[in-house]
Structure formats: structure tokens, C-alpha cells
Amino acid sequence: MAWTWRYEAEGGAPVDPAEALAAEAPAAEAPAAEAFPTQADAETWLGENWRELRHAGVFQVSLLDGERVVYGGMSLSAPD
């Protein structure tokens, strides 16, 4: 199966960061959704890109293995 991130608004509804960001800052780009071969690859990618996703209007993410939610509702807010 492919590992993917589902981008979500604060209430958990799916959100497309490209659309949210286009309304806010048309010249900016959000990281594109990708499929990863392993959970570790997906988690590494998120660690490198979470700030850009947050800036693009993504409040939280859920990790999916195919259609199965592995964990989620993980906030992208910066630690205090």
C-alpha cells in the first residue's frame, strides 16, 4: 500500500492546501500531496514540510496506509 497524508482543517474536514493558499497568496505554492513507499518516508517528508502546509491553511494531518487511517488529527501548530 501507499502511505499518504490527508490534509485537514481544524475540525477534521479535508482541505486542499493549494486552493487555500491560492486565495491567500496566489504566488506561493503549497507542497504537493505525495504517496510514499514506507511510513518512515511519509513521516520524514512531513517533518520537512509541515510549516509550508500550515502556512497553506492545513491545521492538522492524518496518515493513511491505503484507505486505512493509521493515526491522525495530528496538529501542525508549532510547539509552545
Image (cartoon, rainbow, N blue to C red):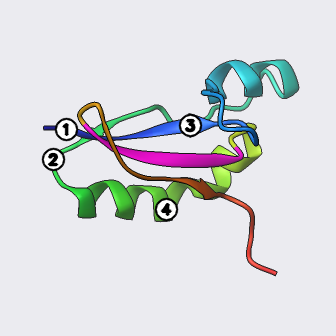
Q: Residue furthest right?
A: 24
The mark nearer the N terminus, 2 or 1, is: 1
Q: Is residue 42 left or right of residue 62?
A: left
Q: Residue furthest bottom?
A: 80
Residue at 75%, 24% (x, y): give it: 20
For label 3, the residue is 7
Residue at 65%, 29% (x, y): give it: 13
Q: CA distance from mark 2 to mark 1?
A: 6 Å
Where is the C terminus found, in terms of image quarters? bottom right
Mark in front: 1 vs 4: 1
Label 2 Cα crowd, 10 Å radius (few <14 / some 14-19 / many 20+): few
Task: State the image coordinates of residue 72 (x, y, percent, origin top left).
Answer: 50, 52
For label 4, the residue is 48
For label 2, the residue is 37
Residue at 63%, 45% (x, y): give it: 53
Task: State the image coordinates of residue 66 (x, y, percent, origin top left).
Answer: 23, 34
Q: CA distance from mark 1 to mark 4?
A: 19 Å
- Above or below residue 74? Residue 66 is above
The mark nearer the N terminus, 3 or 2, is: 3
Mark in front: 3 vs 4: 3
Q: CA distance from mark 4 to mark 2?
A: 17 Å
Q: Do the residues under discs 3 and 2 have CB atoms within 8 angstroms?
A: no
Q: Is residue 73 left or right of residue 5?
A: right
Mark 1, secondary structure of its residue: loop
Task: State the image coordinates of residue 49 (x, y, percent, origin top left).
Answer: 53, 54
Q: Is residue 4 left or right of residue 53?
A: left
Q: CA distance from mark 3 to mark 2?
A: 18 Å
Q: Which residues are magenta?
A: 59-65
For label 1, the residue is 2
Label 1 Cα crowd, 10 Å radius (few <14 / some 14-19 / many 20+): some
The mark nearer the N terminus, 1 or 4, is: 1
The mark nearer the N terminus, 3 or 4, is: 3
